[in-house]
Image: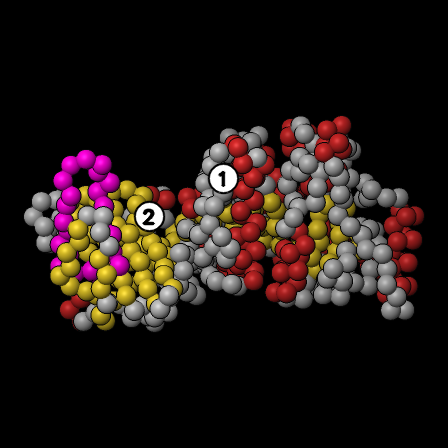
Amino acid sequence: MRSLCCSMLSWWFLCMAGAVMLSKGLARECDEFTDLGFHDSFIGTKLCVKMLLYTRDNLDCGLELSPHRLADTPLLNLTRRTTFVIHGYRPTGSPPVWMGELVRQLIAQEDMNVLVVDWNRGAANVNYLIAVSNTHKTAENLTGFIQNMQENGASLNSIHMIGVSLGAHISGFVGAHFNGEIGRITALDPAGPKFTGTPPEDRLDPTDAQFVDVLHTDMDALGFREPLGHIDFYANGGADQPGCPKTIFSGKEYFVCDHQRSVFLFLRSLNKTCNITAYPCSTYSDFLDGKCMQCDTFKPAPCPIYGYYINQWKDTILHLNQTKAFFSTTANSPFCKTTYMVDIVTWNKPIHWGVITIKMHSGDDVAVARIDHKASKFEQYQTTRLLAQFDKSLQVVQKVSLLFSTNNVVGPRYKLRLLRIRLRSLDHSDRLVLCRYDIVLKENVDVSFRPLPCGKSDF
């Protein structure tokens, strides 16, 4: 298969020159991701696919590979895992801002080959439909490249493809060419426009790899709504992401922030700043209502952790067939929330409806959880179960504050008498379960108390 970018002679000189310089310990010129401008995307460019290799020996200096000279490339070790990173639509023609960090974080996990698939000269076009049509051509080019890898000893099991937006569907097309024998496809907010409603052969689907994990962050605009993998994660429900602009007056960020958040969430799973626990559930509403907090069937840990290491739960996920899982995040990196199950038993005879804000205090640190996605029902002697997701994790909780509100602008102010409140961490099973008894909440008034370890009768 001939490169779309360079002649075979050019490839030969490139690889031989690189080999000589490396053997002599001399520096070589780095091969860079194609950098275009809006002018290029406006007039259009001809598709050209480049494969840029990064390893621990050339972490910050890409090497463009020739599909026919793989055996003569000293940096490429085909006995190692190979991860392909495939970008999506690039209307401005600029390189992805996240690409360098993603390459470095991947290689930090293990000694692998990372191949950046640079198809910017097919993705940079103001006409999105042209970029969509180029996805199949890019996939054909990439398929031929992998076939050459196989001929030189690479195993399909050791290939992991990470596709962003249109890159997710390119990964699927490649996987279909190999009858789903590629080891893993990770799809980061797969593109929705022109793919929604299409049959499986025209988009990513679970049969495209041995394991397909998908993250949805912008399903109501640029992303895909329905499940596409063996497990589909929906961050904050899969649509609007916290911290992203809500109006068009914010400019470009209004259009790309939700969509691009998928990459930054995946990056956080690589640097292990904190773990994002996901909860298998049928709907986001059920998740927020705390109905899906049991993960007894999942191994090796009770609930799967979103991101790069989700393949640890592969066997369980494949056994369950297609799984949807949900999690919530904060607005800023590292995006993690700490989840508590809160059980409240009230004394009031009349049924009250309202929302609760809970604050945990440890010295000057304050963690806040607003349980306001809908009004909760508080009925006499009945347990109201709430899912509280705090914006930070406090190892020691010295004080708890509660705020009850009905959100009524007019009318009387209510009191809510709690016979008991119990707070149990879902992320940290070693933390104390906290209780408090006989608390009166006046509407819109913060009430603080020192929590106590729960007794045996509270479980």
Would residue 107 be visible to someone looking at this image? yes
Of the residues under marks 2 and 1, which one precedes in the sequence? 1
Quadrant of residue 259 in the image?
Answer: top right
In the picture shown, does residue 24 fall above or below 262? below
Q: Position of residue 397 (x, y in %)?
A: 31, 68
| Mark 2 element type | helix
In the picture shown, does residue 148 fall above or below 428? above
Magenta segment: 401-422
CA separation in Å, label 2 and label 1: 23 Å
Would residue 122 be visible to someone looking at this image? no
Q: Quadrant of the N terminus?
A: top right
Q: Residues within 10 Å of mark 2 (few under 14, many from 20)?
A: many
Q: Position of residue 227 (x, y in %)?
A: 47, 42
Q: Residue at x 22, y 57 (%)?
A: 447
Quadrant of residue 376 in the image?
Answer: top left
Q: At label 1, which amino acid type do we have?
A: Pro
> Which of the two marks, 2 or 1, is nearer to us in this view?
1
Q: Residue at x 20, y 60 (%)?
A: 421
Residue hosting label 1: 245
Q: Position of residue 206 (x, y in %)?
A: 52, 45
Q: Residue furthest left?
A: 349
Would you say residue 234 sits in the magenta stretch? Answer: no
